[in-house]
Amino acid sequence: MKRTAQLFLVALLAGGITLGAYKYFFETKTLTLVSQNDETPFITTNLPASPRGAGINEVDFTIAAEKTVNAVVHVKNMTISRGNPIAEFFYGSEATQRPQIGTGSGVIISPDGYIVTNNHVIDKARALEVTLNNNKSYDAEIIGADPSSDIALLKINVEKPLPYLAFGDSDNAKIGEWVLAVGNPFNLTSTVTAGIVSAKARSISPGRNQSFIQTDAAVNPGNSGGALVNTNGDLIGINTAITSQTGSYVGYSFAVPSNIAKKVVDDLLEYGKVQKGILGISALNVDSPQAKEEGLDEIAGVYVAGIEEDSGAQTAGIKEGDIIKKVGNVKVTKFSELTGYLSSKRPGDQVQVTIDRNGKKMTFPVVLKKKQTERLPVMGIEVKNLSEEDQKAYGIKSGVKITSVPEQYRDYGLLNKVMIEVDDKEIEDVEDAKNLFGKISRYGRTSITLLDENGEKERLIFQ
């Protein structure tokens, strides 16, 4: 009897210890926060946290990765380096030329072998080689390129349909949305990294109308031209740049939005060059002393500082002093958001522009037009497209008229003449002129062919 009682007490003690341990270590606690007088609780919850964490584990990257890796290619670019100019003078140009190999990535956008990449990946190429993810290689030809958007289109001839990616709508990308960057960093085969959209409509070069998607997905040398996709596997950007003192990834990178890339590709296929539609306004730099003095650096929108003559904005009724708040369905808080939207449009497209005029909201339908004037790189000459009167006066359909000349070139008699060729390449309009002058070396020789009102040609050499 005594032994039975002892066993009962031991069992009771063990059960108590077990129950206490369970209550202390395992049982879900209920959290209740109440007011100081203990009358009404502010928050009451007894729901356990998600067993899969705060959301990262709920995102499945595998489907997007499987759709993307085989549609991303390795691009090898062979160029010729000119070498030392002093050695070139003494020994000739052939003695100093050296082949150089550059690498990058590209994205297959059609089953018959069209590939989109960055312009800087294929710039100055003597030969291009594309290698698929299955290690099969092809020679590639350049269909077209646009340096201002840093987009180029390649074509390879294939025996059977290739896996490809469809363009998504980059306007629908959300800050904080998960994305994958797929490319060929360090000459590896297709490599996948994950991150989120950190910002949209980001400009990283002063003076250039850029509008990038910023992401913290790791991008390194060789990733340029690769794909930025959402978790559905939709192509929402072309990875383009990183900002780094070391040249390697330091926490954020930039991609050309897919809506801009798609528009550039469509233009290159249809017209052979990019068709840019402009609003016809000049915006006040919010960092300028004038903007800060007048408090315009604190506005949310784009302050219209000037209107171009005969532009779509002028025809529609937009005025100086208006603040652009929205274009299409895109809210505008800064200039890069406006230019990013317009970069996906062509001349002749109509866009709805909502402005704030002295506190009153107004919406104008604006028909975009071609850019009529341009300040050319390197030399700083201002030119404009030929009007119908100019075409009759000079007896020519293409070319650009010189309207302003910097001080150092005024003795050459350039003003009001029509520039028709640069380094033996024909000029059709101001976009052609800008692109050709953008390729001029500051240390080389440049020839310009001009036409005066008498129809006489002259050729000038600048060094």
Image (cartoon, rainbow, N blue to C red):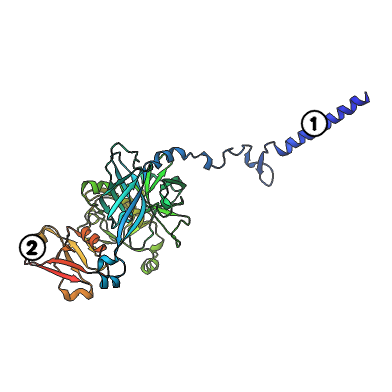
Q: Residue 104: horizontal and vertical position, in percent?
A: 37, 52
Residue located beneath label 2 in the image: 393
Residue ID at (22%, 68%)? 381
Q: CA distance from mark 1 to mark 2?
A: 107 Å
Left or right relative to 51: residue 304: left
Residue with the mark numbered 1: 15
Q: Amino acid at mark 1?
A: Gly
| Residue ID at (41%, 61%) | 298
Which labelled disc corresponds to residue 242? none
The answer to whether residue 221 shows anywhere in this view is yes
Dots 1 and 2: beta carbons under 8 Å?
A: no
- Residue 173 found in image quarter: top left
Mark in front: 1 vs 2: 1
The type of residue carrying mark 2 is: Ala
**Residue 41 spot, x, y in % from top left:** 64, 41
Q: Is residue 379 above or below residue 225?
A: below
Numbered circles on residues, count: 2
Q: Is residue 374 above or below residue 89?
A: above
For the residue labelled by badge 1, is the local secondary structure a helix, a strand or a loop?
Answer: helix
Which sits in the foreground, 38 or 261?
A: 261
